Amino acid sequence: MDWTLREIADRSGISTRFLADLETGKGNISVRRLANVARALDLPVVSLFPSEDEKGAAGTVIALVGLRGAGKSTVGKALGQHLKMRFVELDALIEKQADLSLAELFSLHGEAYYKRLAYGVLLKVLAKDEPIVLATGGSVVTDAETWQLLKRRTHTVWLKASPEDHWKRVLKQGDTRLVSNRASATSAMAELRSIITERAPLYSEAAQTIDTGSIRVKEAVRLVATALRKKDQRAVRH
């Protein structure tokens, strides 16, 4: 509905913090308060409960995480073709929503605005229940709510690479942001290593990790497809 949490909070009488917990599946809501949310959205309460089919649909979303140069676009496109699923880049959807390039968005509104927008766009993507391969931005794991939503609603895959691999791939793509506004290539590499070290514990929370520096794209696709097949088999047995 393109409403903010504040608008829904005003309509329902429930705090924005609790509504955020509710969206990410962390809120333990009472029937009365849930009825207030339903009334605020002008929906029957039952529509807020997923059917059995809908519960499994979100699992068909494969979310690729990792820094620029990890291979998210390359692996994502190949994976989409193999599984007959649409490949989507979250940042492209964010740019379309904001009607700004990422550089303009960060320059005009800052990182906090980008994270809020990313969370809202992700909610819309997941609400469609469409099987897709989703390439996320490198910083998506640094926003707790967005990262929790991805882990809960998608099959997350960390495409891991060494700092040297990240560096070579990004520069080969013509992206010079790594070295722009840096005193030297050495300082840029040091910053890249620092970012990888800082985010690695978060990335490692993904359901699956694939080192794109040691295997080919075809093998990466096979590993993800195999993991999904095993996941489906376990779901059937349970």
Image: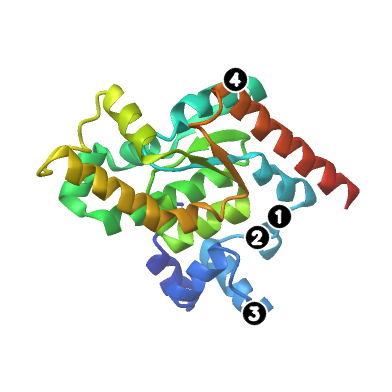
- Front residue of 152/66: it is 66
State if disc 2 and disc 4 touch (CB < 8 Å). Answer: no
Q: Nearer the viewer, mark 4 or mark 3?
A: 4
Q: Secondary structure at mark 2?
A: helix
**Cα distance in 3D space between marks 1 and 3:** 18 Å
Q: Secondary structure at mark 3?
A: helix
Position of 232 compared to 112: left or right?
Answer: right
Q: Amino acid at mark 1?
A: Pro
Tag 4 and tag 3, C-beta contact below 8 Å:
no
Q: Secondary structure at mark 1?
A: loop
Name the amino acid type tagged 4.
Gln
Q: Residue at x 22, y 54 (%)?
A: 110
Q: Is residue 170 visible?
A: yes
Q: How far separated are the C-alphas under marks 1 and 4?
A: 29 Å
Q: Is residue 63 above or below residue 14?
A: above
Marks 1 and 4, the one that precedes in the sequence: 1
Distance CA(mark 2)–CA(mark 3): 13 Å
Q: Which mark is residue 81?
A: 4
Give the residue displayed 57% in from the left and 51% down from the top: 206
Residue 45 screen position, x and y as percent: 67, 65
Q: Residue furthest front?
A: 186
Label 2 amino acid? Leu
| Circle 3 residue | 32
Residue at the (56%, 61%) spot, across then down = 42
Residue mark closest to the camera, 1 vs 4: 4
User: Of label 1 and label 3, which has the lower sequence position?
Assistant: 3
Mark 1 is surrounded, within 10 Å at the Cα level, by few (under 14), some (14 to 19) or many (20 or more) other residues, namely few
State the residue position of label 1: 50
Q: Nearer the viewer, residue 197 or 122?
A: 197
Point out residue 144 in the picture as x, y percentages from the top left corner.
45, 63
Task: Please give the residue where the numbered disc 2 appears in the rendered image.
Answer: 48
